[in-house]
Image (tube, rainbow, N blue to C red):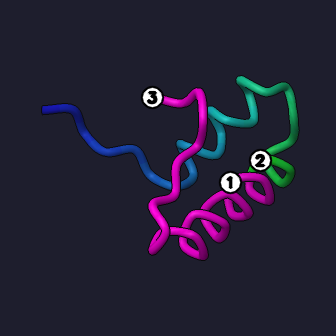
Amino acid sequence: MAKALTKSQILTQVAEGAGITKKEATAAVETLVALSYKHAKNGFTVPGLG
């Protein structure tokens, strides 16, 4: 079983993959997480992902 990534590792990989700063990646990921929590009761999905 794969070892879970830390929040910092995830944010670093997002930043590197998107060519943005870690601060910008943090803002983007936190916004996506907040949006998913807000809409989770209605079956939140991100079209085109996984």
User: Percent x, y for residue 8?
Assistant: 57, 52
Question: Which of 30/42 is in front?
Answer: 42
Quadrant (top left/top right/bottom left/bottom right) for the C terminus: top left
Residue displayed at 52% across by 48% down? 45
Can you tell which quarter of the image residue 39 is in? Answer: bottom right
- The rendered magenta stretch, by its main secondary structure, is classed as helix
* Segment colored magenta: 26-50
Task: Name the residue located 31 percent from the left edge and 45 percent from the top edge.
Answer: 4
Q: Indicate which label's residue lies in the foreground, 1 or 3.
A: 3
Whether label 2 touches label 1, CB < 8 Å: yes
Indicate which disc residue 25 carries.
2
Q: Amino acid at mark 1?
A: Val
Q: Is residue 44 magenta?
A: yes
- Residue 36 % position (x, y): 57, 63
The CA distance from mark 3 to mark 2 is 20 Å
Residue extending farthest left: 1
Count neighbours of disc 3 (C-alpha within 10 A) and say few if under 14, some if 14 to 19, many if 20 or more: few
